[in-house]
Amino acid sequence: MRKYMVVGAVILVIVAAWFVYDRWRAPETQIRDIRLVEDGGGAVQAGQTIGVDVEVKDRTGQGLEFECTSAQGARCWTTNKSTAAFFYTAPRAADVDFDLITVKAVRNGQVLASKLKRIGIVHQASLPPLPPQLPPRPPLIFGFDEPGQGSMGWRLPQDSAATTTRRVSQTAEQHHEGTGALRIELNFSTGRQTEELSTDLVITPPVAGPPYDLSNRILSGFIKFRRDFPSILDQNPGVQLFIVDEEKRSLYGCWKNIEPEMVAEELWINVVLPTNLSPGPNGCRGAVRTAGFDATRVRRVGVKIAANAERPLSYQGPCYLDSVKEVR
């Protein structure tokens, strides 16, 4: 029996030593792969714009920024440096038949990992010149993590008299994911029981893009209130996400009550908006869809915080919004 115990202990020591060695020899941050979206076996037509996805492994769990450069001076860019995804426009020069792009993972100016990707350039002289192309739609995500990112365009609608939020700003004092969130200064008083703020969804590089197609998608966000927020059940305070199409028709998602225990424990409250929802008692509670709303042509996304106007609450103070994104 003692011999078996000794053998088991030796095996455990060997496994632990191998784990430590494996952790020691492997870099903490790695760029494992660079993939071209909708490529032709690693080749791109001259002048074509495609997406570039980067697979990253990072053991540190700290924020990274990503950079992309082209050996041929081609355009390789991103709308969010903290997201490992780029757009690449292949050069048109007739004497260029391949390019090398370099993707780097950077933290505080230090390059932690880099990787090269060879891209073949295909020329088809018999075809007419390609028209200006829109880049692939970047994912809808608002994390408020990148330094200097500010409110990412989140603001108050100028035409809403019921809206009383005085200030929105990026903050590092709270976060659900990453390192930051959006701080919203609330001001609830008699006759002012609704707060709404939203942001435009616009794809700008290299040319102004179309509305977002969010049909059959699910949006999710997290909001947090301080302990001094007056969450009283008969006042029925709650929160919901909403989206607006280019004709200003709206879809308000599932209503989420702000329960007293959520406030007392300062929990992050998850709110969702399935864009194919059916408002009504058999569908998503509290949802409201404007007649004619078109989920394929969405221009704005926002959040609504409201209470029962017949039992008004009084509160001046902050709440926090984070991780507003598509989850499916």
Image (spheres, helix red, strand yellow):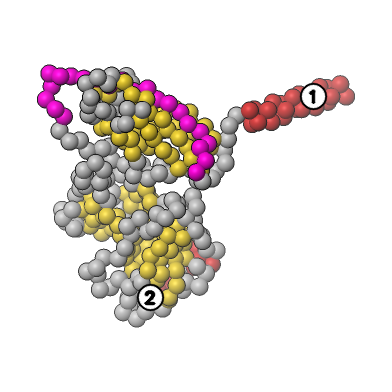
* Residue 76 lies in the magenta stretch: no
Residue 291, position as x, y percentages in the image? 16, 56
Q: Is residue 20 left or right of residue 164?
A: right
Instruction: Assess whether mark 1 and mark 2 are in contact (beta carbons under 8 angstroms).
Output: no
Mark 1, other Cα within 10 Å: few <14 / some 14–19 / many ≥20: few
Which residue is rendered at x = 76% and y = 27% of the image? 13
The image position of residue 272, as x and y in percent, is: 37, 52
Left or right, 96 with respect to 144, comes to left
Numbered mark located on residue 22 in the image: none
At mark 1, the secondary structure is helix
Query: Residue shown at 21%/43% (left/top)?
Result: 207
Q: Which residue is mark 2?
A: 188
From this viewpoint, is residue 236 visible? no
Q: Quadrant of the C terminus?
A: top left
- On screen, 165 above or below 54? below
Q: Is residue 246 visible?
A: yes
**Residue situated in front as seen by the camera: 252 or 61:** 61
Which residue range is magenta in the image?
109-130
Distance of mark 2 from mark 1, alpha carbons?
Answer: 66 Å
Q: Quadrant of residue 80?
A: top left
Amino acid residing under circle 1? Val
- Identified by mark 2, the residue type is Phe
The image shows residue 270 at horizontal and vertical percentages of 43, 55
> Dot 2 lies on which element?
strand
* As drawn, 41 above or below 16: above
Dot label at residue 10: 1
